[in-house]
Image: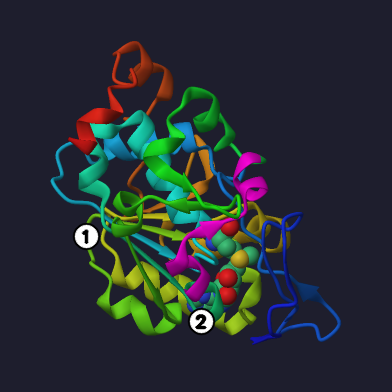
Amino acid sequence: MRISPIIKNNIYFHANYRKVKNPNDDSFYMMTTTYFFRADTDWDYLGDYLCEKYKDTDKVNVICHACSHGAEPYSFLMHMAAFHPLEFNKFTPVVAKDIDAENIEMAKKSEYEYEDIAESGALDYFTTGLYKYFMQPLDNGDMKMTKKFRDAVKFDQGNIFDDISSMPRKNTVLFCKNMWPYLSVEERHRLAKELSEHFDESCVLIIGSYDTSQLEMQELLEQYGFKQNPNDMFIYEKRKAGCPYNVYHDQKAIKEAGKDIPLSIDDIFK
Ligand SMILES: C[S@@+](CC[C@H](N)C(=O)[O-])C[C@H]1O[C@@H](n2cnc3c(N)ncnc32)[C@H](O)[C@@H]1O
């Protein structure tokens, strides 16, 4: 993979705008786009599903690889804090990494243009007043994540291939979204194989719509033992051959059981 220096930080691309040379096709360029509450993740479903899946687990290891400038791990944490506050701590700290040192530098600063946030689903948090738990306005109008949230994410630079062996084998949720097209064909197979061999059945892999729009992700992941969640095409679990996917995370049933009633966010900030 070859990446150019940052060209500009453009709100319309919600990210560091870089040109990236496709390893398979010299003429094809991509950008390291990211934004808050990226729409390819159904955040409501993901929160319900993870809380239900790990309801008997004390600690869940959330790793967000290829996190770009940090919008992804922060979106996850804001959603969990708002809708699952009593379980927030169980999912922290989130380990967030990217191969790109400048992206990680931005992520560590955790300062974002107001428009970058306000255009996204985070706008709901402004209208409900919840934003003050998550972000503080700076003098220049930008927003900085609050200390509580900055402390809940450990940002570091790293190549995912170097990190697999140190990821916990159990109860790990790996966000690995919208980065697969950056890899060569051989690297994609190597990544799917190494993740599958490393993780046990308690782990979850989350991919994105840029991955599926460019690649046959289901075919790739299922040949190495991952199984697609029937309720969400971007969520995979490790499954033993012949073992059906559990349907314990039926969203309607969870709601009917009253488990999704938002609890007071103050509980986690006491
Ligand atoms: C399109 S962005 C996706 C950002 C975020 N995951 C999202 O979906 O919004 C792709 C990111 O993958 C990172 N990346 C590419 N290859 C990587 C690798 N081998 N290890 C870690 N990060 C990588 C790039 O630096 C870039 O920030």
- Counting from the top left corner in percent of width and height, residue 235 is at 47, 48
Instruction: Please tell me which residue lies in front, 51 or 199.
Output: 51
Q: Is mark 2 within 8 Å of ligand 1?
A: no
Please give the range of residues in magenta.
Answer: 105-118
Q: Earlier along the polypeptide chain: callout 2 or callout 1?
A: 2
Instruction: Please tell me which residue lies in front, 67 or 197.
Output: 67
**Cβ–Cβ under 8 Å for marks 2 and 1:** no
The single residue placed furthest to the right in the displayed view is 27
Q: Is mark 1 within 8 Å of ligand 1?
A: no
- Disc 2 marks a residue whose amino acid type is Ala
Residue at x 32% of width, y 46% of height: 243
In the rendered image, residue 115 lying in the magenta stretch gets the answer yes
Instruction: Please tell me which residue lies in front, 13 or 151.
Output: 151
Q: Is residue 172 above or below residue 119?
A: below
Residue 160 placement: quadrant: bottom left
- Counting from the top left corner in percent of width and height, residue 226 is at 42, 57
- Counting from the top left corner in percent of width and height, residue 20 is at 72, 79
Question: Does the rendering let one see residue 205?
Answer: yes
- Disc 1 marks a residue whose amino acid type is Lys
Question: Does the rendering let one see residue 206?
Answer: no
Q: Is residue 237 above or below residue 164?
A: above
Q: Is residue 87 above or below residue 152?
A: above
The residue at which mark 2 appears reads as 101
Label 1 neighbour load within 10 Å: few <14, some 14-19, many 20+? some
Q: Quadrant of ligand 1?
A: bottom right
The residue at which mark 1 appears reads as 170
